[in-house]
Image (cartoon, rainbow, N blue to C red):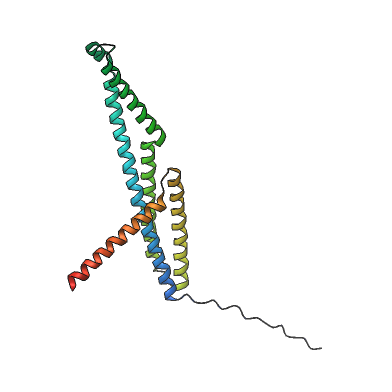
Amino acid sequence: MRIAKKKVTPAAEVKPVSPEELTELKNYIKLFLKDISHTETALARDAEWNSKFSAIGKVVLIFLGAFVATKGAASQLLGANSIANTVIFTLAGLVIAVIAGLDAAFKWEKTSADLKGLAATCRVSILDGITDFQKSFGQPTNEQKRDALEKLLGSLTKNLEDIYSKSATLGINLAREVRHRRKKIEAQSDVFATYLVNENT
């Protein structure tokens, strides 16, 4: 009785990782790190504006609060029924109410602190990314280099998604701001390149 030999199917060959594939992955990570850097700049700028609004609002409230405290003395000087006295202190009270309302609505001080925290997260993410990026070069094979780079890309993607999500809850449209900053930098680079060409011709 003849026993049929079992046909062995050769295992699928694993396609080796080409240097071009690694270069493309490295360039993509570099662009990703630049976007995180642009994000950090946008967050730091927005944090600074919120901090300024908070400081100005506090100064104005302190000044107007002290001014309103002089209402009694002003009434004695100008008269309790003075129209000027009534208008001035009514306007002062209105400004106090408006500024206090804006501060309560936009929470400038808290928003500034939260944005600074997100900017710091961006900085840490960039530094960690650069470190892991350099470490990937020390891997012995292209496959291991690719795996390390893909792991890094996944980590950067998650970090950026978290930052965008948290900034959205603060009312910050990072996608628009980062896109605007990227275009501005590209425009500046084009102008500089044109200047160099003109200088060399």
Instruction: Tell me if residue 50 can be seen.
Output: yes
Q: Quadrant of the C terminus?
A: bottom left
Residue 96 in the figure: left or right of residue 163: left
Q: Quadrant of the N terminus?
A: bottom right
Q: Give residue 52's position: percent from left, percent from top.
A: 30, 39
Q: Residue at x 39, y 67 (%)?
A: 27
Q: Residue at x 36, y 41 (%)?
A: 112
Of residues 53 and 2, the one nearer the viewer is 53
Q: Give residue 126's position: percent from left, percent from top.
A: 37, 56
Q: Residue at x 35, y 58 (%)?
A: 182
Q: Is residue 33 above or below residue 118?
A: below
Q: Is residue 11 above or below residue 89?
A: below
Q: Give residue 91's position: percent from left, percent from top.
A: 31, 24
Indicate the quadrant where residue 77 lies. top left
Of residues 159 and 64, the one nearer the viewer is 64
Q: Residue at x 46, y 50 (%)?
A: 162
